[in-house]
Amino acid sequence: MWRVGMVVALHDETPTARTIALEVPDWPGHVAGQHVDVRLTAPDEYSAVRSYSIASAPNSEGRVELTVERLANGEVSPYLTQEVAIGDRLELRGPIGGWFVWRPQQTEPVQLVAGGSGLVPLMAMIRSHAATGSTAPLRLLNSVREPGAVWYRDELQAISDGDSSVTITYAYTRAAPKDWPRPPGRIDAALIAHSTLPSNLSPTCYVCGPTSFVESAAGLLTAFGNNPDKIRTERFGPTRLLRGSVRIAAQQSVLPKRICKCKVPASWHGAPLVSTCSFVL
Ligand SMILES: Cc1cc2nc3c(=O)[nH]c(=O)nc-3n(C[C@H](O)[C@H](O)[C@H](O)COP(=O)(O)OP(=O)(O)OC[C@H]3O[C@@H](n4cnc5c(N)ncnc54)[C@H](O)[C@@H]3O)c2cc1C
């Protein structure tokens, strides 16, 4: 079932990542870790669908926040990070997913490992943990390219400052802050041993990011003694191969570059809907 959400706020996390807050009047609620599918449709019926994790904590206000990283040669993410404006309507389907989720009823320790935009569903878990006053020990190992690429920096700092059960460690892959104790590099065995919860505490681990990152981090967690059954993963891999038919449709577009209006239902809560979504094909 496709719903229509209205963009009510935009916030740039970094020069290439934007948080989009949507109000979805008939939103059924979600669990931290779930995602939505976002659909953009052109008048000629060509459409593109991409998955985006929900960054916001579960709430009863029908507010859903997504954070999108712009890929320079991407089809959808440049539109979502540069073109979408407050008041635009976006079609979305969800919430989706029942395995890669954290519920406040979970009392066991939680180990989160994020690579790049893989932080988004983990941020929803951290926000949910904070909003519900959970005392479950929670650690985040956040792998980012460089200091300027850190998302939600102030909020993460405030949460960890105010809650002794939350610990956050950054790992920089390309450039680290001055005097940072670890040289830039990928997550490795030493970092896992030093900064994640001991495996004898049987934490539930959530690992999210690009496919290669997830496989590497999950392998290291297993090597460190974590039970593979307690390691939940979500991969943000390329979508083109999965959606080959959509890609073919794009290649068949007659006009190589044109602005289309986003096709959305004709009415929203009984009111005529004027979509201002422009989608560059
Ligand atoms: C469950 C799920 C949740 C997701 N949540 C988020 C999220 O919260 N925030 C977010 O920014 N993205 C998220 N993604 C990725 C998102 O769905 C898109 O793949 C991404 O925005 C790229 O779409 P695009 O149309 O701009 O690029 P495309 O036109 O699909 O691809 C452009 C180029 O980038 C490559 N590519 C595509 N996707 C990725 C990727 N994720 N990483 C590296 N290279 C890629 C392609 O192979 C191609 O070469 C999620 C994916 C999944 C499966």
Image (cartoon, rainbow, N blue to C red):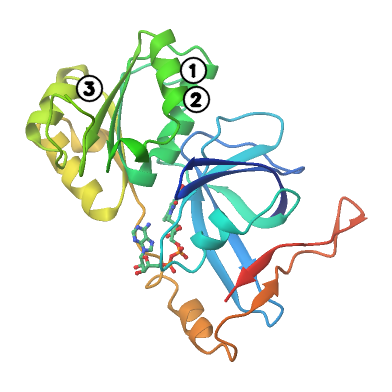
Spatial CA distance of label 2 from label 1 is: 5 Å
Q: Residues within 10 Å of mark 3 (few under 14, many from 20)?
A: some
- Which quadrant is the C terminus positioned in? bottom right
| Amino acid identity at mark 3 | Ser
The residue closer to the viewer here, 239 or 255, is: 255
Can residue 1 be seen by looking at this rendering?
no
**Which numbered dot is residue 127?**
2
Q: Which mark is residue 80?
A: none
Asked which quadrant contains residue 195, the reply is top left
Q: Quadrant of ligand 1?
A: bottom left
Check disc 1 and report the residue beneath it.
130
Q: Amino acid at mark 2?
A: Arg
Alpha-carbon span between mark 3 and mark 1: 21 Å
Name the residue at 66% across, 75% down: 259
- Indicate the secondary structure of the residue bearing disc 3: loop
Q: Nearer the viewer, residue 111 or 73?
A: 73
Return the residue at label 3: 202
Residue 205 against residue 137 in the figure, above or below: below
- Which of marks 1 and 3 precedes in the sequence? 1
Given contact means CB atoms under 8 Å apart, are the residues at marks 2 and 1 in contact?
yes
Tell me the quadrant of the picture where the N terminus can be found.
bottom right
Question: Residue 124, relative to residue 4: is it above or below?
Answer: above
Q: Nearer the viewer, residue 92 or 74?
A: 74
In-image side of 271 versus 206 (left or right): right
* Mark 3 vs mark 1: in front: 1
Q: Nearer the viewer, residue 238 or 225?
A: 238
Q: Report the side of 216 relative to 274 (left or right).
A: left
- Residue type at tag 1: Ala
